[in-house]
Image: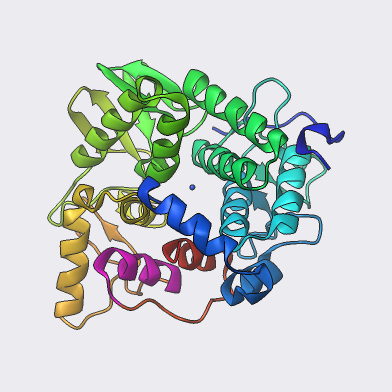
Amino acid sequence: MSILGSGHAIDRRNFTLGLMLAMTAACNTDAQSRSPAHDVNWRSYRDMYMRPEGRIVDTGNNGVSHSEGQSYGLLLAYKAGDAEAFEKIASWTQAYLSRTDVALHAWRYDPNSPNPVADQNNATDGDLVIAWALGMAGQRWNRGDYSTRAAQIRTAIRSRCVIERHNRRLLLPGLQGFVNGTEVTLNPSYFVWPALDAFAKLDGQSVWGPVITDSEAITRLSRFGTHRLPSDWIVVSAPDQVAPARDKPPRFGYDAIRVPLYAALGGRQALVPDIAAYWRACLAANKPIPAWVDVVTGEEANYALSAGGAAVAGRLLGTAQPSQLVNDYFAASLQMLARY
């Protein structure tokens, strides 16, 4: 079935995730050389979190689904060479999350709600990875519908989710709710470097180069507190003025854990030297890496990183990663992505 021919597209919501390009060819070869039946990690992930119809389920959040999870499923199915699973995930995403007014996706699907996609806003990281995965799959499996949809999403992201403020091109987290006068709220973990690099190769450096350059600059500026760590959410109020968002906990935590993940997968470890230094210091002191750090007060969580966070730390530092895939959607997703 063509994902563009699915007839269920319904109105969606309003909301208030790499790999360096140089690795893409190697990963393509790796995935093509294996049957998905022999990819134990992918098979486990698929069995735990993918419904038969292609919906990726957030088991830690009342069984909802997100464009983020669908994007992870697509990327991981692509890497495993699992064309059947990829098609199911792509078709479900198109049918139930695609917006009718713009080639983006509603961020959340709640099967327990009378209106499962009441919030029509998108989550730009999910759209980035969906477009990236569809573009690669279109080339590998000669699927013109995948390639066409990927191009549509890229165009929508560039035209609708990138704004010019403070002499920068800022990648918004979503269509609505992130611009308040001169202040723009951003999420540094939404800078999915391998996807952006792939877009620049497809559409041209002139289209995506400025977005990439300014997102790198924002990442360098997002270093706060004693350990110089990024917070989950930030506010840009001037060309070089970046601060933790005031309306959210100023933590290097659940979201920001993906900043070093995408930096490592996108060949940009130089963007996150302070994170690496902080994690190495924890290991040298023989203490667990805390799950979060308040970048203002320095307070640390009294519990350690999840297996997913530990996998990200292992990928960035070149140390061992947890071998057992955990039974938690987000942690398991981080584990799988850290192995990408």
Q: Residue at x 35, y 42 (%)?
A: 188
Question: For this rendering, which residue is in front, 90 or 21?
Answer: 21
Residue 257, horizontal then vertical, whole percent: 36, 57
Question: For this rendering, which residue is in front, 26 or 147?
Answer: 26
> Which residue appears farthest toward the left when viewing the image?
226
Q: Residue at x 66, y 34 (%)?
A: 119
User: How many numbered dots are placed on residues in this image?
Assistant: 0
Question: For this rendering, which residue is in front, 111 or 247?
Answer: 111
The answer to whether residue 248 of the structure is visible from this angle is no
The secondary structure that most of the magenta stretch takes on is: helix
Q: Which coloring applies here?
A: rainbow
Lateral position of residue 191 relative to residue 112, left or right: left
Residue 70, horizontal then vertical, whole percent: 64, 50
Q: Is residue 311 magenta?
A: yes
> Which residue appears farthest toward the right when viewing the image?
7
Residue 179, horizontal then vertical, whole percent: 41, 22
Q: Residue at x 24, y 53 (%)?
A: 269
Q: Which residue is drawn at 41% across and 45% down?
A: 194
Which region is colored magenta? 307-319
Q: In which quarter of the image is the N terminus?
A: top right
Look at the picture and state if 314 lies above or below 105.
Answer: below
Look at the picture and state if 167 lies above or below 330.
Answer: above
Look at the picture and state if 309 lies above or below 192.
Answer: below
